[in-house]
Amino acid sequence: MTDAILTVTTLCKSFGAVQATNDLSFTVRRNDIHALIGPNGAGKTTVVNQLSGDMLPDSGTILFNGVNISRKKAYQRARLGIGRSFQITHIFENLTVAENMSLAICAHSGHNFRFLQHFRRSPPVLRELAKALARVDLLPRAELPASHLSHGEKRQLEVGMAMVGNPELLILDEPMAGMGPGGTAELSKLIRRLKGTLTILLIEHDMDVVFSLADRVTVLVYGENMATGTPDEIRRNTKVRAAYLGEES
Amino acid sequence: MSLLSRKTIVIGGGALLLFFLPLVAKLTGQPYLLSLGSRILIYALAAVSLDLLLGYSGMISLGHAAFVGIGAYVVGISQFHSYEATPFLSAPFLLSGSENGLFVLPLAILVAAFAALIIGALCLRTTGMHFIMITLAFAQMLYYFFISLEKYGGDDGLSLYARNSFPGIDLSDDRHFYYLCLTALGLFLLFTCRLVTSRFGLIIRGAGNNDRRLKGLGIRSTSYKLVTFVIAGGGAGLAGALLANQTEYVSPGLMHWTLSGELMVMVLLGGLGTLFGPVLGAAAFLLLEEGLAMYTEHWMVYMGPVLILAVVFAKRGLFGLLAGGNSRDD
């Protein structure tokens, strides 16, 4: 039995009459790529928001490394080692690529009440910036404003920023959304490269990507855990095929 | 960045022009240029401090005049007690009036910064539209407070007997005063240039750009924003203290929201999110005001369209126009 890094138990969240997360339980094992899939409106992003702390659950618990984090704020969870990328790319558009990455580095280097030294000359940035940019292949783009990057590169930057500080759990919310086939292949390669060094919770639409990358898959339908298993088990699961995968598979 | 980029030329040219302005005023026999120049420098100082809020950390404050007014009143009240030979405070510690600029100007900065600490701590519990309204509300509260403060002139304000004294220089000489203002602006610009490219500056620029993402990275921006608010308040306080010295008059009008609005216009006109832009903006605004006021008292009618054109067509305002839209501070 591999140990669990994240254990979600009977999580509930409703918006008015809509039960977005309904008694949801699942476990993510350490160093797995765990995919969370489900049809549109299944409540995937609501789950992610509750895991990252952008939303608080109505009830239920979230154990991260054995600690109950379900009432903790987003920045506290980030410090505990949960990195997140957003479905809609969330970077600092007005800042350069290097500044974006430096900001992520500074966030993990204690307080930032240093007023006079240029941030590029501060020890943590000197130490990590080049490495962090190289990890997501953005070293040549460092001095460009982030708004000038292509969509795929923005994604890479975002993943790179979430990777700074070596989070134990990286949540990627639809990283392939809105990307062409080239970008998808590029990012898949990047994710595969990270495999084994940390745990990734991948929320994804693209089934090819999910089945090629994931170790385990949880299928979410109407906010409930319909099935959890290896990609093969999920493919064979008749309930899932009927509810979600349909005739395609 | 090459040594002779457009940005270097604009900043260097501007600095040279400001440095030699007293000489020009003397040679052309237009001493009036000097007081206009001082006024531009003082407003520029206030506008640069406001841009730290508007352009860098995304705090839209419509109450910045409050800190200008506080700085000015520190000078006014301090001199009032100095002439009356009465203490301003006798308990818990004795604080008597003073006309010594070396004491009064830092005091103005400190008092304004302290006011910014309290007002900022309350305002920063809100964001967006509420933040705009609550900063405005605090400034107007102070405005009415000073109107009702009969001891210090109330509605009529306080007249200064003379400018502050300064060892080695004579502020009643307009040239000396001009160079004091130029030094103050220069030092503040130097400090803010370092500030916005520091780690602290990186955080506040991030907060101005995408506060939610900053939280996702594990940074709560509130305390960084509060410190920025305090620094900006201190800068505005210094501007107010200088303004009081220049006009030798202090009135509640300095806290009125119209001054906050004018400062905001200067920032927008000169270039939001740049440090030298607000200096250009202050110069352009005051020169336009002077120029247009010669022809009509309704000069605002012409100022309006100029501002709209600047905001719509010039990326980063006048500074962007002159130095290139992508010029940065570092």
Image: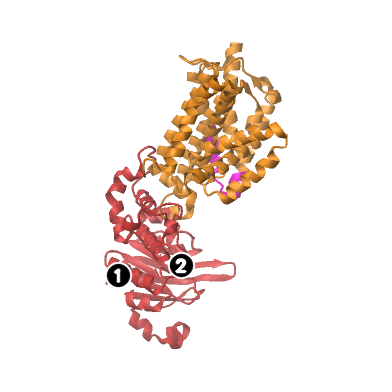
Chain colours: A red, B orange
Residue A144 shows in the view: yes
Residue A166 shows in the view: no
Give the letter of the chain under mark 1. A
- For badge 2, the amino acid type reads Val
Q: Name the residue under label 1.
A: A192
- The mark total stands at 2
Toward which corner of the image does residue B146 lie, by quadrant?
top right
Where is residue B316 shown, x and y percent of the image? 52, 47
Mark number, residue B330: none
Tag 2: Cα neighbours inside 10 Å, few (<14), some, or many (≥20)? Answer: many
The question of residue B281 being in magenta is answered with no
Q: Main secondary structure of the magenta part?
A: helix
- The relative height of residue A27 versus residue A135 in the rendered view (above or below) is below
Q: Mark 2 points at which residue?
A: A47
Point 69% across, 24% down: residue? B154
Q: Left or right: where does residue B3 sit relative to residue B255?
A: left
Where is residue B327 shown, x and y percent of the image? 44, 46
User: Range of the magenta residues?
Assistant: B114-132
Give the letter of the chain under mark 2. A
Q: Left or right: where does residue B117 sit relative to residue B257?
A: left
- For badge 1, the amino acid type reads Arg
- The relative height of residue B94 versus residue A65 in the rendered view (above or below) is above
Where is residue B135 shown, x and y percent of the image? 60, 40
